[in-house]
Image (cartoon, coloured by chain):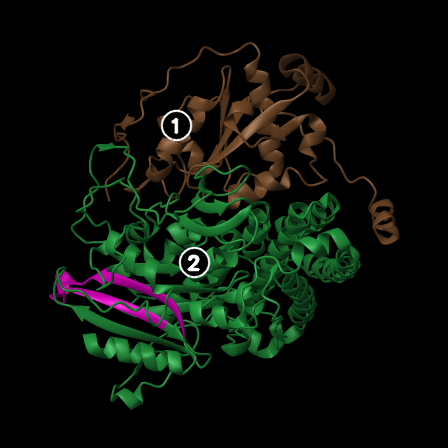
Chain colours: A green, B brown
Amino acid sequence: MNVAPLGLAAALLPAGVRAQRTQVSSGQLLTACRLAWEQDARLIALWASDERDRRRGFCIRVALEDGDGLMVLEHNLPDADARYPDLTPIFPAANRMQRATYDLVGVAAEADDQRPWLWLASWPVDQFPLRRDFEAPEKWEATQEEYDFVRVEGDGVHEIPVGPVHAGIIEPGHFRFQVVGEKLLRLEERLGYTHKGIEKRFEALPLLEGGRLAGRVSGDSTVAYAWAHAQAVESIAGVEAPPRAAWLRALCLERERLANHLGDLGALGNDGGFAFGLAQFSRLRENVLRGNAAAFGHRLLMDVVVPGGVACDIAWEHVHAMRDEADRTAREIATLRAIYDDHAGLQDRFRGCGRVSTELAIKLGLLGLAGRASGVARDVRCDLPCAPYDQLGVRMALNDGGDVAARVAVRFDEALESTRLIIAITAALLDPPAMGDVRATFGDIAADRLALGYVEGWRGPVLVALESGPDGSVRRCHPHDPSWSNWPVLEHAVIGNIVPDFPLINKSFNLSYSGHDL
Amino acid sequence: MLHMLRQIARVGIRTEPPPAPASDEAATARLQLHILQTLGRALTIRHVDAGSCNACELEAHALMNPYYNIEGLGIRFVASPRHADALLVTGPVSKHMAIALWRTYDATPEPKLVIAAGDCACGNGIFADSYATIGAVDRMLPVDVRIPGCPPSPTALLQGILAAITVAAPPPPRIEPTIEPTIEPTIAKPESSQTL
C-alpha cells in the first residue's frame, strides 16, 4: 500500500514477504485506513503492546495487506486513558480485535461496542494480562460473566442457546440463535472459551523455542503457524532458511492443506446426510497422515518447521512414496468429486445454502478459502509468494457462488492443486541442486526488533508479529488467525437459512476457535 | 449410484484390528467380551474440549475413520453427557471452560469415567504455566486414565479408552471432586503452577 498521498514516509519492515511500517497520528490512522480501503487493502490484524517501560505509553498496530505487501500502521497512545479511533466503519472485522485488545492490554477504541470479547470473568476486570506489570491472581473464583447478547423481539421469536460444549468432537464456543419457526433471524457468537494466554506464554519462552508454541496456536494449521513464526524469527536475525528447507516447508504446508480439505470434504458430505463421503474422505485423510508420520515422525507435522529451516530431512523412499500417494489421491478425489456432483440430495443441501455474496465478502473482509469461494481472488501463495512458491506457480482456486457448494468446490480444486504441488515439490526434492542443509544456525539475536511472518494456511492467511527482547527473549508476539475476520461473516451467512443447515454452513467455513481465542 | 457402489466395492473393508489396551495384556477378543459384559453392548463417550489447540480433536475424529472404526467396537461418541459412560477431556482446562467442564461432569450419570487425553490434559502441556489455564484435568476432576501425546495418535487414544474400560470393572474407589458442585465453584490456584 502506498501512504505517500498522506505525506507519510514508510520504512521497510523485516518480514517473510514485502512489508512496510509507518507511524501515524490519531487522525492519520483513520485516513490511512480509508485510503487502504480505497486501494483494495484488507485488514489482517490489529493488536497492541505495552510500551510504558520505554515511556511511549501503548502502541496500537494495524496490519493491512493489498496484494503488493503488508503495511503496518503504528499509533502511539500516551496512556491507558487515551483512546484510538474506531476502525469498524471502514473495516467491520476490527470490532472483535478492538475489544480483545482492550481485554488483554487495556486500551480502548472510541467505539460504541465496549463489551468484553476474550474476557470471561476469569481474571479481575481491571487487570490486563499483556501489560508488563500483570500478575496472575493467586486465587480465583470461577464466575459466570453476564454478556449482553442482542435479542430479537416479536411474535413467535425464540432463542436457542448452544454451547460452549457442542454436540460433537469440536472446539467450544457459544452460539445464540434468534429463530422464528425454523428460520434463523440472527446468530450471535460468543467466543473466548479456549483462551489459554498464548501471547503471554510466548514472552516466557526463549525466542528460538517459540516455534513449538506457535505450532500449537491452532493444531490444524500447525505448519502454517510454525512457518510464519519461523519467517519472523529469521527476519529478526537476518538468517535465511536453506533452499531445501523451503521445499520441505512447502511440502508440509501442502500436505497440511490436503489433509484438512480431505477431512472437511468428508465431514461436509456427512453433514449433508451422505455418510459414504465421510468414510471415503476420512480414509484418504488417514493415508496422508500416516505418510506424514512415516516421513517426518508426526502425523500432523508438529515441530517439523523450525526457525532456521526444518527439523530433519526426509528419506528418498518417502519422497517417492509421497509422489505416488499424491498421484493416487488425485485420482480418488476426481472419482469422489463426480459422485458428489451427481448426488442430487447432497447438491440440494449444498446449493444456495449459507450464501455470502462477493460484495458482502469484500465489505466484511472475508479471508482465505471462504473468501475465494465468494469471488475474492486473494491467495498469499500467488500474491506474495515466498520461496519456493515463486517457482511453483500456484493456480488459485476461485468460485463466485458464495454458498456451501462453492466452498466445497474450492476445497476440491485446492485439494487437487495441492496434489499437483506435492508432485512438483517431490520432483524438486529429488533434483541434485536441491540437496544440502535443511537448517541454518543462529548467532546473537538483536533486541527490540519487530518482524512479521505471513503464510497462506489452508484456512487463510496466518500472520505472526514478533518483537525480540534482550538476550534472545521475546518482548511481544501476536499470532493472528484468519478466523478473526471470518467468524463475523458466518453470522451473516446463516441469516434466512434454517436451523438444521447451521452445522453444514459452519462446517463449510470450519473456523478455528483456538487460533482465535489465543 | 453405480459409481458409488463401484467405489465401495473397489475400496473394500479397511478396518484394522484394534490395538491391545495400554495397561493390559488381555487378548482383544477377551476384551471385547469384557466390554459387552461390563457395559452392555456399548461404551458411550462425551468429548469435552477444555481449551485444546484442536489437534487432539482431529485425532479423536480419526478414530471414526474406516481404519480404526471405533463404532465397530461398540464405542460411540455421544452428543450429551446424560448419555455418556465416560468423558474424554482434552486441553489444559482453560479457566474460561472450567464451569462448563464441571457442569458436563456433573451432568454425567454415575458410574462415570474420566479420560484425560493429550499432554495438556495430563498436565505436561505447553499451556500449563499460564494465567488462563488450570493446567491439568486432575486438578479439577478425578481422572481414571491418562493418555499422553501431543496429540495422542488414534491408536494411543484407542488403547487408553480400552484401558479405561478395564479399570472400570471393578469400579475404582471414587475420589470426591476437588471442587464443590455449586453453581459458582471456587478453584484454588494449584501450588505447582508458577505465575508469569
A101 lies above or below A242: above
Q: Residue at x 53, y 67 (%)?
A: A371
Q: Are marks 1 and 2 in contact (CB under 8 Å)?
A: no
In the drawing, what numbered circle is on residue B102?
1
Q: Position of residue A64 (x, y in %)?
A: 37, 73
Residue A297 in view (yes/no): yes
Q: Residue at x 33, y 37 (%)?
A: B95
Please check the rendered image and state whether residue A363 is part of the magenta-colored stretch, yes or no: no
Q: Secondary structure at mark 1?
A: helix
**Near-viewer residue (B82 or A312):** B82
Q: Residue at x 86, y 47 (%)?
A: B5
A68 lies above or below A500: below
Which quadrant of the structure image shows residue A98? bottom left
**Near-viewer residue (A207 or A61):** A61
Residue A308 in view (yes/no): no
Name the quarter where the N terminus of chain A is drawn.
bottom left
In the drawing, what numbered circle is on residue A488?
2
- Read off the magenta span: A42-63
**Near-viewer residue (B192 or A148):** A148
Please check the rendered image and state whether residue A53 is part of the magenta-colored stretch, yes or no: yes
